[in-house]
Amino acid sequence: MPRLLKSLVVAGLAVACASLSGGNFEHRSEAVTPASNPNARPAADGRVSPRLAKPRIEPVEKESWNDAQRALLEPIDKAGRLYNVHKTIANHPKLARDWLTFATYVLRDNSLPVRDREILILRIGWLCQADYELAQHARIGKRAGLTDDDIKRISNGPDAAGLSDHERLLLRAADELHEDACVSDATWKGLAMTYSTQQMMDLVFTVGEYNLVSMALNSFGVQLDEGLEPFPK
């Protein structure tokens, strides 16, 4: 196709797409832009990442739970761990039930040391700019032994000063999975010197789970729970 004709076709498609999206613009949720959100944080590649100022999917509150939601959320509520993420996912009880099975495994039963697990979760949360995930797991990570300096190094990435060789490999693995959907040979071999086969598998599934969670939190507009401190910038 001649270059001029190709350019005209591409421009025509762009106009058509803009026209279609403009037709139902009023039904979209309003996103936070750098100008309207003074707390917006640059994304990993330097762009400013817009996030939702209010939920797209409202969390279901206790007084409006149906039977399926009550069966799902009451045990979590009684355990004192009922958060906005649970109340939001409960809009789809069947999905929520099956997701929680896997999420519980990753968070509580997988074979990685807890501190290592939290390093991976915080790194993928940072790469996805998932404010809710970062805020929750900064708190959980500190209970697992991470310091404020550790958390700052995690956000700075695998080339940050002060990391151990093992921590550097963990951050690199998260970065590679995020960027290329594959752990490189060098990173794999480095981690496999101290990790078992099961731990290597759990590493990939941990990053994958929290990449998925980040997508959901960001897309659904899950807001910080009361008393939850925003992640340090």
Image: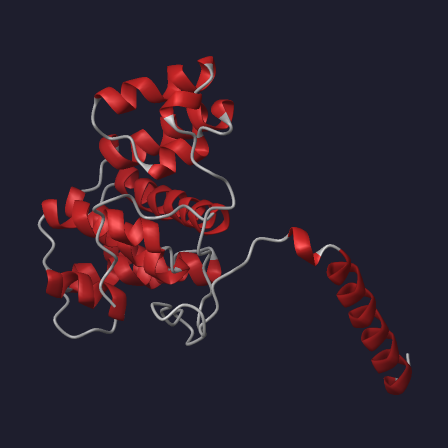
Q: Residue at x 21, y 41 (%)?
A: 112
Between 40 and 149, the one nearer to me in the picture: 40
Q: Is residue 229 left or right of residue 162?
A: right
Residue 103 at x, y = what percent?
Answer: 35, 33
Give the vertical position of 115 relative to 14 (above or below). above
Q: Residue at x 16, y 75 (%)?
A: 161
Q: Residue at x 23, y 32 (%)?
A: 108
Between 199 and 192, the one nearer to me in the picture: 199
Q: Residue at x 42, y 73 (%)?
A: 45
Residue 4 figure quarter: bottom right
Give the vertical position of 132 relative to 104 (above or below). below
Between 65 and 9, the one nearer to me in the picture: 65
Residue 60 at x, y = what percent?
Answer: 43, 30
Residue 19 figure quarter: bottom right
Task: Please indicate, yes or no, whether residue 8 appears anywhere in the rendered image.
Answer: yes
Q: Is residue 19 left or right of residue 142?
A: right
Task: Please indicate, yes or no, whether residue 192 appears anywhere in the rendered image.
Answer: no
